Amino acid sequence: MLSNKKIGMIGAGNMGNALIDGLIGSGATGPENIICSDANESQLEVVQQKFHVATTTDNIKVVNASDIIIYAVKPQIIASVLRETADHLDMSKLIISIAAGVPMAAIEAVLNKDLRLIRVMPNVAVAVREGATAVAAGGHASKDDVRLAMAIFDSVGKSIFLKENYLMDAITGLSGSGPAYIFLIADALADAGVKVGLSRKDALFLASQTILGSAKLLLETGSHPGPLKDSVTSPGGTAIAGLHTLEKGGLRTTLINAVEAATNRSKELGEIVIKNFANGETKT
Ligand SMILES: NC(=O)c1ccc[n+]([C@@H]2O[C@H](COP(=O)([O-])OP(=O)(O)OC[C@H]3O[C@@H](n4cnc5c(N)ncnc54)[C@H](OP(=O)(O)O)[C@@H]3O)[C@@H](O)[C@H]2O)c1
């Protein structure tokens, strides 16, 4: 699907690197189909040596050479990079923004013409090809455009299509910010292991592997978490004693509140970004 498309990556940082790695490593496309730009030449050298893709410091060259352009620069500078490249964008090109917290409306306000636009919200786990990504389409993007975007992000994990664009804030609150919650939970479980006598190293390893294994069980069995929880909870046993304590501590409510708070914050920040971008400012 992607092998006959030229892909341009603007920004060769964490995300740019992870995406190029996934695209080539998964066989989705070859290095000859990728061109990458960055303001930082040493960053480009790394990418060139690691992946053998074409590199340049000229963002416009990337746009002109590509069918699909991924804007993988920081949210603070995406408006200026969009403005710099806007005259070279037209309906023949698919434009993908991965800038966290930058709503489609803000991008449309900067570009101010009909373009095939996709907004994507990945998470940090793309670095280990286990990203959880949501893909939303702008007015002029087709179903094929969505498939192309999903193919790119499926090379670094798994993606879903989000029909309701406005739910991107909920995605930011759940899977975008989610790794932070899980890291905190892993750290707390490791502390707990140390409290009951394990070494820090063993406790953190066991906590992390338990999170990985439990996630795999959920995804591979397709089961609701309830029956899986029930299957490891024997009458009068250890797991139910632990679960009772978690319920007393309000774990469910706390997690629901956390996702809701992050979603609301994403909404607030998004509204500021839309206002600033429309006013010609780039501050996010
Ligand atoms: N990392 C994540 O987990 C994550 C998750 C979800 C979404 N995102 C989004 O992904 C985007 C990229 O994040 P990142 O973590 O990959 O950032 P990053 O590591 O800072 O990479 C951005 C790259 O863009 C370069 N750059 C700066 N100005 C440029 C310009 N005018 N033209 C071309 N390149 C330029 C930067 O160079 P310098 O270093 O020299 O400035 C840097 O190499 C962000 O919008 C972020 O919100 C990231």
Image (cartoon, helix red, strand yellow):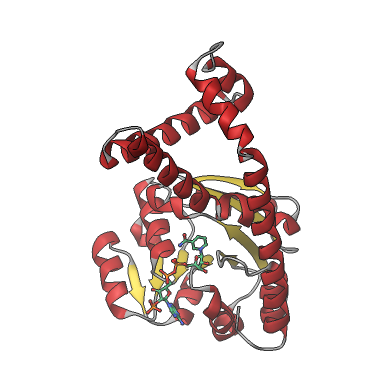
Where residue 77 appears, as percent x and y from the top left, is: 53, 80
- Residue at point 59%, 80% (across, down): 79
Image: 20 above or below 242 = below
Instruction: State the image quarter where residue 249 is shown.
Output: top right
Q: Nearer the viewer, residue 32 or 117?
A: 117
Where residue 182 appears, as percent x and y from the top left, is: 49, 46
- The quadrant of the image that shows the C terminus is bottom right
- Residue at point 61%, 19% (across, down): 227
Residue 236 lies left or right of residue 59; in this view the side is right
Q: Nearer the viewer, residue 115 or 154?
A: 154
Q: Can see residue 145?
A: no
Ligand 1 location (quadrant): bottom left
Specify the farthest residue to the left: 49
Specify the farthest residue to the top: 235
- Residue at point 56%, 10% (across, down): 235
Q: Nearer the viewer, residue 143 or 122?
A: 122
Q: Can see residue 258?
A: yes
Specify the farthest residue to the bottom: 280
Count of numbered badges drawn on the protein: 0
Where residue 142 appears, as percent x and y from the top left, is: 70, 56
Where residue 36 appears, as percent x and y from the top left, is: 39, 70
Residue 52 lies left or right of residue 119; in this view the side is left
- Residue at point 34%, 73% (across, down): 55
Image: 112 above or below 24 = below
Residue 253 lies left or right of residue 41; in this view the side is right
Q: Nearer the viewer, residue 190 or 127?
A: 190
Residue 196 lies left or right of residue 282; in this view the side is left
